[in-house]
Image: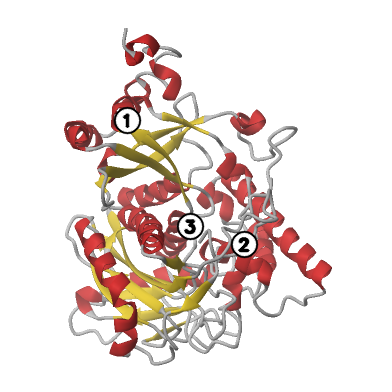
């Protein structure tokens, strides 16, 4: 008897998920079912598959499966621990899974498993040297086959479907700033680490002196890493447009062609995860933390370009029409007013960390502080760009490590509210109202506003509040213990975010 036959069937086929889970609950569209057939045919050429879902923090959580195991998981799903729904950014327990989770999801009690079902439309072969590995995104489900109320990807899917019900298609363009640094020899960061106690951040050095915007020589100093990275991104089918050197030392901006909303969020998650991994293999460290605690570093932002198409005709709804001097149509102006009206309520979803609010302070002239719009003005929160069929808006609020599904969903939801209200006169860029200046302030606006539950549902709203309350409390406790006023980037922030993000 061979080893494999000896252990065949122990625990049953459903030990990795629920046998026939996808078919039993009708979880796939016809398009997904067809894609699954192609994935199964490709598995003969694959060794390992990473099954990934995006947690509330915007981080990719995964299990690596053998191709043989994935054959059943593709249709049965895979059990995952709810830890990412329970811990805050520093892995402190923020949701009481023993006594009372308080998020309206019974299965969180006792930290029971949920099921992740692969979305075969997202299956990608990764550019890993020496082995044949694939990546596939999954959707979270409760054990009874209903969609998990804490799923960030499902939030964006619901918003997209509300657009579709009105024969509209939102389109998203990604413009992302991040830092490439050279990794130095140093400890792995485990000393003093634990639940809610992040160890030392990676020791790094800058790639160049910076502060020569778009200087070709500055880009060349990072090109040995970023050029091969660009090729790998294109090989994955991501619609890469540019790699550019920004202001800071080794600060890179990466832009992509417009995509459908869910595709854009999926691409953002894959892009950030792959960038960190590829750079690490080359002895470098990539970080999407907005402002690392490193000398001379400038804040990084994430600018979300957006427009809306008529699903029937393909016409850009934001286009003012031929011979019209306005930058945006009436519908476009209503969309912008929706973004502005929800700017404070939803800021938490675009800027979800303590560190992200460093960028929104008055010390950085090209970062938005006031809630307003302008034409081709980089100091405004919302910038109006293009003309005719290329007319679109750019929201400059976000930080690069934000959860892509929640950040994009929040903006599309707010924009759709504006379209529905028929507003035609957006607030000017000279509005005295400002964006929140701290995570605590943004959390209060999110908690006290009236829009979060409509967008996210009650369970995810409650979960995010608990997670962010824990993060703010730990930061404030550290500042008090250290006698730090918290008015500059702290060592706490650097340990909390620099490695993870």
Tell me the residue at 59%/40% (across/down): 83
**Visible residue check, residue 330:** no
Of 131 and 476, which appears nearest the observer?
131
Quick one: label 3 or label 2, which is nearer the N terminus?
Answer: 3
Q: Is residue 485 above or below residue 73?
A: below
Of 31 and 401, which appears nearest the observer?
401
- The answer to whether the residues at label 3 and label 2 have Cβ atoms under 8 Å apart is no
Q: Nearer the viewer, mark 3 or mark 2?
A: 2
Query: Which residue bears the numbered disc 2?
Result: 496
What is the x, y in percent for residue 82?
56, 37
Q: CA distance from mark 1 to mark 3?
A: 26 Å
Query: Which residue bears the numbered disc 1?
Result: 70
Q: Secondary structure at mark 1?
A: helix
Query: Which residue bears the numbered disc 3?
Result: 403
Of 71 and 463, which appears nearest the observer?
71
Seen from this angle, which residue lies furthest bottom?
Answer: 212
Q: Secondary structure at mark 2?
A: helix
Tell me the residue at 32%/30% (across/down): 70
Tell me the residue at 36%/80% (across/down): 384
What is the x, y in percent for residue 90?
64, 55
Q: CA distance from mark 1 to mark 2?
A: 33 Å
What is the x, y in percent for residue 106?
62, 30
Q: Is residue 13 above or below residue 371?
A: above
């Amino acid at each position: 008897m061979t080893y494999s036959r000896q252990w065949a069937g122990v625990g049953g086929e459903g030990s990795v998920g629920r046998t026939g889970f996808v078919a039993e609950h009708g979880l796939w569209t016809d398009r997904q079912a067809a894609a699954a057939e192609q994935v199964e045919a490709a598995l003969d050429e694959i060794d390992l598959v990473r099954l990934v879902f995006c947690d509330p923090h915007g981080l990719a959580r995964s299990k690596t499966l053998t191709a043989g195991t994935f054959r059943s998981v593709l249709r049965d799903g895979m059990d995952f621990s709810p830890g990412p729904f329970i811990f805050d950014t520093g892995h402190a327990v923020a949701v009481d899974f023993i006594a009372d989770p308080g998020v309206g999801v019974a299965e969180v009690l006792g930290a029971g498993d949920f099921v992740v079902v692969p979305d075969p439309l997202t299956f990608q072969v990764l550019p890993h040297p020496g082995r044949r590995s694939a990546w596939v995104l999954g959707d979270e489900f409760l054990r009874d086959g209903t969609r998990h109320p804490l799923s960030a990807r499902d939030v964006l899917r619901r918003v997209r479907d509300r657009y579709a019900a009105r024969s509209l298609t939102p389109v998203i363009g990604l413009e992302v700033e991040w830092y490439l640094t050279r990794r130095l020899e140093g400890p792995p960061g485990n000393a003093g680490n634990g639940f809610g106690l992040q160890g030392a951040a990676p020791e790094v050095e800058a790639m160049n002196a910076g502060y020569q915007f778009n200087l070709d020589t500055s880009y060349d100093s990072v090109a040995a890493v970023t050029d091969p990275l660009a090729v790998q991104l294109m090989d994955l089918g991501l619609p890469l447009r540019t790699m550019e050197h920004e202001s800071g030392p080794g600060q890179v901006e990466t832009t992509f062609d417009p995509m459908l909303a869910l595709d854009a969020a999926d691409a953002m998650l894959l892009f950030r995860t792959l960038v960190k991994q590829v750079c690490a293999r080359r002895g470098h460290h990539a970080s999407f933390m907005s402002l690392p605690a490193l000398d001379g570093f400038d804040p990084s932002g994430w600018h979300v370009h957006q427009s809306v198409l008529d699903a029937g005709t393909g016409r850009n709804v934001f286009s003012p029409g031929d011979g019209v001097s306005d930058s945006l149509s009436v519908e476009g102006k209503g969309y912008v007013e929706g973004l502005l009206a929800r700017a404070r309520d939803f800021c938490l979803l675009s800027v979800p960390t303590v560190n992200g609010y460093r960028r929104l302070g008055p010390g950085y002239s090209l970062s938005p502080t006031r809630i307003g719009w302008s034409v081709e003005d980089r100091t405004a929160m919302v910038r109006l760009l293009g003309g005719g069929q290329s007319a679109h808006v750019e929201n400059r609020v976000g930080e690069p490590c934000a959860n892509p599904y929640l950040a994009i969903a929040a903006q599309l939801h707010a924009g759709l509210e504006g379209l529905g209200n028929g507003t035609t006169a957006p607030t000017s860029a000279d509005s005295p109202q400002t964006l929140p200046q701290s995570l605590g302030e943004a959390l209060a606006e999110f908690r006290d506003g009236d829009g979060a539950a409509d967008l996210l549902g009650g369970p995810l709203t409650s979960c995010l509040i608990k997670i962010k309350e824990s993060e703010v409390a730990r930061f404030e406790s550290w500042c008090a213990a250290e006698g730090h006023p918290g008015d500059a980037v702290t060592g706490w922030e650097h340990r909390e975010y620099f490695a993870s993000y």
